Image: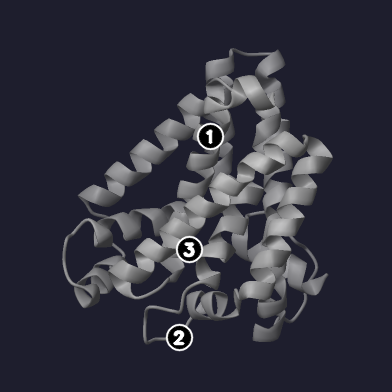
Amino acid sequence: MKSFLLMITFLTRLPIKVKLKFTERDFIKGIKYLPIVGLVIGILLWAVSQINHLIDRAVTVLFVWMFYIWITGGLHIDGLADSFDGIFSNRNKEKILDIMKDSRIGTFGVIGIIFVILLNIVLSYFIDFKVLLIIPVLGRSCGILSCAINTYARKDKGMGKTFVEYSNFKNAIFVILITIIITIMFFDYMLAFSEILIFLYALLLGIYFKKKIGGMTGDTIGAVIELSQTFSLLLFYLLRGLIF
């Protein structure tokens, strides 16, 4: 439970009043709880979407993703922006990593944020709001999956290094199973089966980052989470006649 609370405080803005002393071991043990953290976020997103009974759907979707940015503190979106700035600079590995570490946002980072959020808003308009329950679960599971086939790309230490090093094959299998179980609980086997494509997408992202910068960083984890969520929305939009 302590590890789960650590993940909640680290990955969301939810107020946790319990004062506990956390160690690196607690953080390591908490990695496997990321899909559950995603489910908590998903339930809150779905709850916000219920204002659709009172206001127009387009405005509802906008509020849903504004709430998402608030509840996550923009943590993963920041990683997405840094990753875009570095990767699309067309520099060598060392320079890309330096650019990603720069706290200032560049042109490609802004473009990445705009397109991802815009796609999330537009795609969410056309699908059942119930899907919001599973989208954050998939994003965080994909983050672990990408890390499981990678090493840490930087030489320095940090939460990103710990996360990448301990997102091993065992944790990857665990989060995939948890994600599938959650999906079947709220949806059906057809939707769970379609998630294979999403997991493959996360693996391809992991392979791409490994080729480009030699592995994963905290920023690329955020990028994988955000890009996987958007890809999931796109896939569910394309398959909405079959799975909903």
x, y (%) of residue 52?
66, 18
Query: Element at badge 3?
Result: helix
Residue at left 39%, top 74%? 215
x, y (%) of residue 116?
41, 40
Say which amino acid is labelled 1.
Leu
- 156 is higher (above) or lower (below) than 196: below
Residue at left 71%, top 72%? 30
Q: Which of pointers 3 and 1 indicates the residue nearer the eye?
A: 1
Which residue bears the numbered disc 1?
Answer: 235
Earlier sequence position, callout 3 versus callout 2: 2
The quadrant in which the C terminus is found is top right
Which residue bears the numbered disc 3?
Answer: 221
Would you call the spot at circle 3 few (<14 residues within 10 Å), some (14-19), or many (20 or more)?
many
Q: Nearer the viewer, residue 179 or 4?
A: 179
Residue at left 79%, top 73%? 2
The quadrant in which the N terminus is found is bottom right
- 118 is higher (above) or lower (below) than 23: above
Say which amino acid is labelled 2.
Lys
- 55 is higher (above) or lower (below) than 171: above
Could you say which disc has been placed on residue 157 in the image? 2
Would you call the spot at circle 1 few (<14 residues within 10 Å), some (14-19), or many (20 or more)?
some
**Residue 135 appearing in the image:** no
Query: Element at badge 2?
Result: loop
Alpha-carbon span between mark 3 and mark 1: 21 Å
Say which amino acid is labelled 3.
Ile
Could you say which disc has been placed on residue 4 in the image? none
Q: Is residue 201 left or right of residue 11?
A: left
x, y (%) of residue 118?
41, 32
Earlier sequence position, callout 1 versus callout 2: 2
